[in-house]
Image: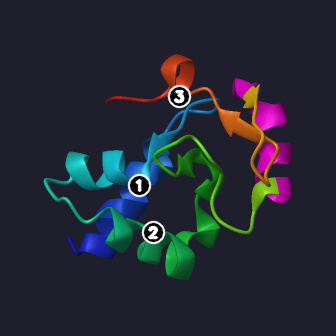
Amino acid sequence: MSFVDAVLAVVADIPSGCVMTYGDVAALLGSRAARAVGQVMARYGSDVAWWRVVRAGGRPPPGYADRAREHYEAEGTPLRPSSDDDGYRIDLASCRWRP
């Protein structure tokens, strides 16, 4: 299985209301290549629940905060207020998925 296919398979398995960081996905695949996971998601992630993969601090994917928030609210993903440009962060302590 290619790295791209492996990343997409992991993302497809993340349950509704849960998230993983780019680094979490990479580590699960035995890699430290969090940026490569981000590249896979940017190029090929439109057919999977892309909003369930977040940055290390719990921030949504770059440039998709508004679209992602709609999904988080629909799924009941716990959010916390944040003073950054996005205005919120995902509460990783309560919804980080660790298969």
Is 72 magenta? The answer is yes
Q: Position of residue 10 (x, y in %)?
A: 37, 50
Q: Which label number is shown at residue 22? A: 1
Quarter of the image for the C terminus: give it: top left
Is 73 magenta? The answer is yes
Q: Going 25% across and 72% down the picture, which residue do you hit?
A: 3
Type of amino acid at the residue the image marks with label 1: Tyr
Residue extending farthest front: 83
Magenta part of the protein: which range? Answer: 66-79
Quarter of the image for the N terminus: give it: bottom left
Q: Going 46% across and 46% down the picture, which residue do you hit?
A: 56
> Is 33 located above or below residue 99 in the figure?
below
Question: Quick one: SS at disc 3?
Answer: helix
Tell me if label 2 and label 3 are in contact, CB under 8 Å: no
Q: Residues within 10 Å of mark 1 (few under 14, many from 20)?
A: many
Q: Position of residue 70 (x, y in %)?
A: 86, 45
Q: Quadrant of residue 69?
A: top right
Residue extending farthest top: 94
Tell me if label 1 and label 2 are in contact, CB under 8 Å: yes
Work out whether mark 1 precedes mark 3 in sequence or the reverse, and give the earlier one.
Answer: 1
Q: Going 53% across and 38% down the picture, which residue do you hit?
A: 19
